[in-house]
Image (spheres, rainbow, N blue to C red):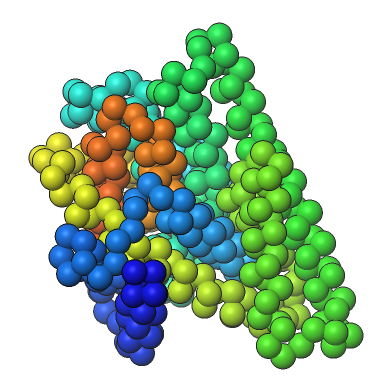
């Protein structure tokens, strides 16, 4: 069965790669195609592969994919532009993200009467982070002003790492693994460890990795095809070291990539090209596995509450906090609405829901179903609207002379 699954996944990946560049110019996203084909190959349809949603394999694949995507995306960030608009991503992360979790909790409280308070908090946290990979169609679209693209990229790069300690905190409470007396200490300890250690590992990895790689490249110690390896290895090194030391590997990867991209000037494109290709491939395989494991399993638990929450999660729960957190910045209305809408849910939410499922909570089925169908709605709606809305917004921003 393992060889059969490998044959199916590799065969479809080969076929898709032949038309991927053409499909990128259409509203059809690669994630949506892979999820649908994964579902068709699942035991619920043609029974070509069988993947366990709470198995360690899917969790590790999603984690490593997200780590590599975060590193390469942040490495492509224009630091000069980012310095000019740093107040936007800072507000999105420090004000918008907590508000998103709070609003998500409030909406879930009104809709899901069968879940406990900590389960509701888990649901809101799992769907709070945005996806750097799914947002790639927007953050790489040159029609969109650089300041908006970089702000969205930084937000999506850091919010999943920030959400990790929040998720672990609510998960410990939901599972009854800590009492009220320990909860306060845990609420302080987890964020400090996750963010602090992650940032330190990322800084060390980005500085040392870029300097050593430039030194060796200038002396032709590394050249040709070997230039394709270091960035992939460095991204995984940052992730693994941070997780091993008790920090957030996702924050380490984003910070490491940001610093690496700022310091590696001369051969930056050569370093990143192969890593981005591997990251894209891993992302699509993750979507394939997710489609095969989750859709059929959650179908029986699907009801109106899931649909309503998914729609509200992608609209009100996301857009309203964005408006509130950038209110004093006096951005144009269409800029704020554009940033609010493009908060796709994806790989981070997959990683989080697999972590929650391993705890076997009473409401696991409804949590999995809601997260799964919110992600599916996101990859459909954000995939369809990415290029058209980016073109329309970019044209309006250009008419204003680039003013956001």
Instruction: Report the residue at 68% width, 45% height from top.
Output: 244
- Find the residue positioned furthest to the front: 1
Image spot of residue 276 (x, y percent): 54, 74
Q: Pick the quarter of the image with the C terminus.
A: bottom left
Location of residue 3 with respect to 161 vertically, above or below: below
Count of numbered tags: 0
Location of residue 273 with respect to 175 vertically, above or below: below
Image spot of residue 364 (x, y percent): 30, 35
Asked whether 390 or 333 is in front, the reply is 390
Location of residue 18 with respect to 367 vertically, above or below: below
Residue 110 is drawn in which quadrant? top left
Residue 132 appears in the rendering? yes
Image spot of residue 284 (x, y percent): 39, 69
**Horizontally, is 215 left or right of 291 in the view?**
right
Asked whether 355 or 212 is in front, the reply is 355
**Horizontally, is 180 left or right of 272 in the view?**
left
Location of residue 65 with respect to 120 vertically, above or below: below
Instruction: Report the residue at 50% width, 10% height from top.
Output: 180
Residue 336 appears in the rendering? no
Asked whether 23 or 316 is in front, the reply is 23
Instruction: Report the residue at 23% width, 64% height from top.
Output: 42
Instruction: Report the residue at 21% width, 39% height from top.
Output: 309
**Horizontally, is 397 left or right of 274 in the view?**
left
Image spot of residue 3 (x, y percent): 39, 75
Q: Pick the quarter of the image with the N terminus.
A: bottom left
- Find the residue positioned furthest to the top: 181
């Amino acid at each position: 069965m393992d060889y059969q699954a490998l044959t199916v996944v590799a065969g479809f990946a080969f076929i898709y790669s032949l038309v991927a560049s053409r499909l990128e110019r259409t509203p059809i996203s690669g994630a949506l195609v892979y999820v649908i084909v994964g579902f068709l190959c699942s035991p619920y349809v043609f029974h070509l592969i069988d993947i366990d949603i709470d198995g360690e394999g899917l969790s590790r694949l999603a984690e490593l994919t997200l780590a590599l995507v975060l590193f390469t995306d942040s490495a492509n960030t224009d630091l000069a532009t980012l310095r000019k608009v740093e107040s936007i991503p800072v507000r999105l992360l420090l004000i918008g993200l907590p508000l998103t979790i709070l609003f998500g909790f409030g909406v879930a409280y009104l809709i899901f009467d069968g879940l406990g308070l900590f389960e509701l908090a888990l649901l809101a946290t799992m769907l709070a982070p945005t996806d750097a990979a799914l947002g790639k169609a927007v953050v790489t679209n040159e029609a969109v002003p650089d300041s908006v693209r970089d702000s969205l990229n930084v937000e999506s790069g850091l919010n999943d790492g920030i959400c990790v300690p929040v998720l672990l905190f609510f998960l410990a409470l939901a599972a009854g693994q800590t009492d009220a007396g320990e909860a306060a200490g845990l609420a302080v300890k987890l964020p400090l460890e996750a963010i602090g250690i992650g940032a330190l590992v990322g800084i060390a990895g980005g500085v040392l990795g870029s300097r050593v790689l430039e030194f060796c490249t200038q002396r032709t110690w590394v050249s040709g095809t070997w230039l394709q390896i270091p960035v992939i290895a460095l991204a995984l090194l940052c992730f693994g070291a941070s997780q091993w030391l008790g920090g957030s590997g996702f924050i380490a990867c984003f910070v490491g990539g940001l610093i690496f991209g700022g310091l590696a000037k001369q051969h930056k494109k050569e370093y990143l090209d192969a890593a981005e290709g591997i990251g894209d491939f891993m992302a699509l395989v993750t979507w394939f596995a997710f489609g095969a494991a989750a859709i059929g399993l959650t179908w029986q638990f699907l009801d109106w509450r899931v649909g309503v929450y998914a729609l509200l999660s992608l609209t009100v729960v996301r857009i309203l906090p964005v408006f509130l957190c950038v209110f004093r910045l006096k951005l144009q209305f269409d800029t704020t609405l554009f940033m609010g809408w493009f908060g796709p849910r994806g790989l981070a939410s997959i990683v989080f829901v697999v972590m929650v499922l391993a705890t076997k909570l009473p409401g696991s089925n409804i949590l999995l179903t809601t997260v799964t169908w919110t992600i599916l709605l996101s990859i459909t709606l954000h995939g369809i609207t990415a290029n058209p809305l980016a073109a329309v917004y970019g044209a309006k921003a250009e008419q204003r002379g680039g003013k956001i």
